[in-house]
Image: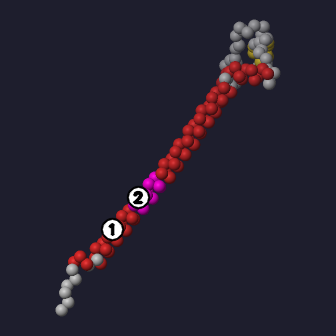
């Protein structure tokens, strides 16, 4: 009969367990490392997007400021005066319409002062004819 093999000489079961354990630790470390690298990549992309958003926001603020300067009344006045050769009106006249009752027509008459009242059409003509407005 053969003598049993002592326990300290059996290496198959423990060595296989150690190899599997080390393989599991190695896989875990590689997984954690790749997750960390992916996190750094995402963080870099987020910082890049934030910088682009900030740059576009700054450009938008500059464009808003430029737009506001273009719409300022003094700039419009200077542009109209220099480029379009527009001048302020010196002689303002008011036109008064005088109704001619026997012909049904109206005659334009230039008034001499700006304070004269302007009467619109009377009666049924008022419904058919609108009055002029400076905003129109």
* Residues at circles 2 and 1 in contact by the CB criterion of under 8 Å: no
Residue that appears at 28% across and 73% down: 14
Q: Secondary structure at mark 1?
A: helix
Q: Residues within 10 Å of mark 2 (few under 14, many from 20)?
A: few
Q: Tell me which segment is drawn in magenta.
A: 29-39
Magenta segment, prevailing SS (helix, strand or loop): helix
111 vs 77: above or below:
above
Could you say which quadrant of the image residue 106 lies in?
A: top right
- Tell me if I can see residue 125 in this picture: no
Where is residue 93 drawn, in percent x and y? Answer: 77, 12
Q: Secondary structure at mark 2?
A: helix
33 vs 96: above or below:
below
> Nearest the camera: 40 or 112?
40
Where is residue 41 drawn, in percent x and y? Answer: 50, 52
Q: Which residue is mark 2?
A: 32
Image position of 45 (left or right of 114): left
Q: Which residue is mark 1?
A: 21
Residue that appears at 79% across and 17% down: 87
Residue that appears at 20% across and 84% down: 4
Q: Residues within 10 Å of mark 1 (few under 14, many from 20)?
A: few
């Amino acid at each position: 009969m053969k003598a049993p093999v002592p326990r300290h000489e059996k290496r198959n079961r423990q060595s296989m367990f150690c190899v599997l354990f080390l393989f599991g630790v190695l896989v875990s470390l590689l997984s954690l490392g790749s997750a960390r690298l992916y996190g750094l990549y995402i963080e870099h992309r987020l910082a890049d997007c934030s910088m682009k958003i900030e740059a576009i926001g700054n450009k938008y603020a500059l464009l808003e400021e430029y737009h506001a300067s273009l719409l300022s009344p003094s700039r419009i006045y200077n542009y109209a005066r220099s480029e379009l050769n527009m001048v302020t009106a010196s002689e303002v006249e008011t036109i008064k319409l005088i109704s001619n009752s026997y012909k049904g027509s109206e005659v334009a008459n230039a008034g001499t002062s700006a304070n004269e009242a302007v009467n619109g059409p009377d009666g049924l003509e008022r419904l058919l004819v609108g009055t002029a407005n400076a905003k129109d």
